[in-house]
Image (spheres, rainbow, N blue to C red):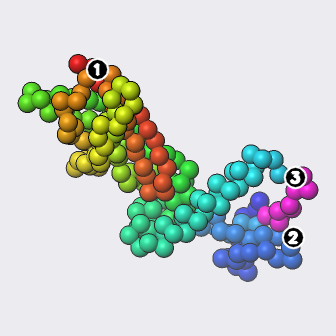
Amino acid sequence: MAKSKSLLTVGLRGTIGGTLVFRRLNGETVVAAAPVPSSKQASESQLFQRERFRLASHYAKRAVSDPDLRVEYELVARLKKLPSARAAAIADYFRSPEILNAKISTEQSGVVIVEAIVVDYLRVKSVAISVNDPEGTVLETGNGVLSNDNQTWTYQVQNVAALVAGVRFDVTATDLPGNVSSQSLYYQD
């Protein structure tokens, strides 16, 4: 790949004669040989990755067509030195939210709270909490409430009387592209 400094090629983009490709990269015009399709059959993992990228591209197209979301992705692109809001949206598609710290706490008043710090490439859309008895029966479910720090989600358990040792709390975080992460906590008397 070569950088073109000629006034004739400044801002030029596309393929010429099927042999040269001009594109803009970091504000400069670069020239490269046109790609040649492989004659080999694609492997199953390559086909899977191509499908994932196709879906990521569709998500990015929808995301940047939303004016508010586009502004958010443009900000992320600048912070992470990515070329565009579309590139940031594609990167977000490939990353699931991370549950960094989840815990159960009991206040003096007897209120039980599940708290989780959840981060994502752009932002977390929702955090759901499921309370399950030791046999796996769902006792209650609900949505976490986002605090002012935009990372901490809390959920107040409604049926505290049903809490016994072995009760499992499932924390499930979902981001804007629909990626899901889960973590389980166990209640101790």
Query: What is the three-letter code of the residue carrying label 2?
Result: Thr
- Nearer the observer, 157 or 85: 157
Q: CA distance from mark 3 to mark 2?
A: 23 Å
Find residue 19 and name its label.
Answer: 2
Which residue position holds label 3? 41
- Nearer the observer, 127 or 149: 127
Q: Is residue 77 above or below residue 45?
A: below
- Nearer the observer, 181 or 97: 181
- Which quadrant would the C terminus be assigned to in this image? top left
**x and y percent of residue 139 in the render?**
30, 37
Which residue position holds label 1? 165
SS state under label 1? loop
Whether residue 146 is visible here, answered yes or no, is yes
Q: Is residue 4 above or below residue 97?
A: below
SS state under label 2? loop
**x and y percent of residue 78 in the render?**
46, 59
**Residue, x 42% and y 49% (percent of image)?**
174
* Residues at circles 3 and 2 in contact by the CB criterion of under 8 Å: no
**Residue, x 38% and y 27% (percent of image)?**
135
Query: What is the three-letter code of the residue carrying label 3?
Result: Gln
Query: What is the three-letter code of the residue carrying label 1?
Result: Ala
Disc on the earlier residue, 3 or 2:
2
**x and y percent of residue 170 in the render?**
37, 36
Q: Is residue 152 left or right of residue 184?
A: left
Q: Which residues are magenta?
A: 32-40
Q: Nearer the viewer, mark 3 or mark 2?
A: 3
Find residue 93 and name its label.
Answer: none
Question: Within 10 Å of the Cα at label 1, are there few (<14), some (14-19), or many (20+) other Cα atoms?
Answer: few
Whether residue 100 is visible here, answered yes or no, is no
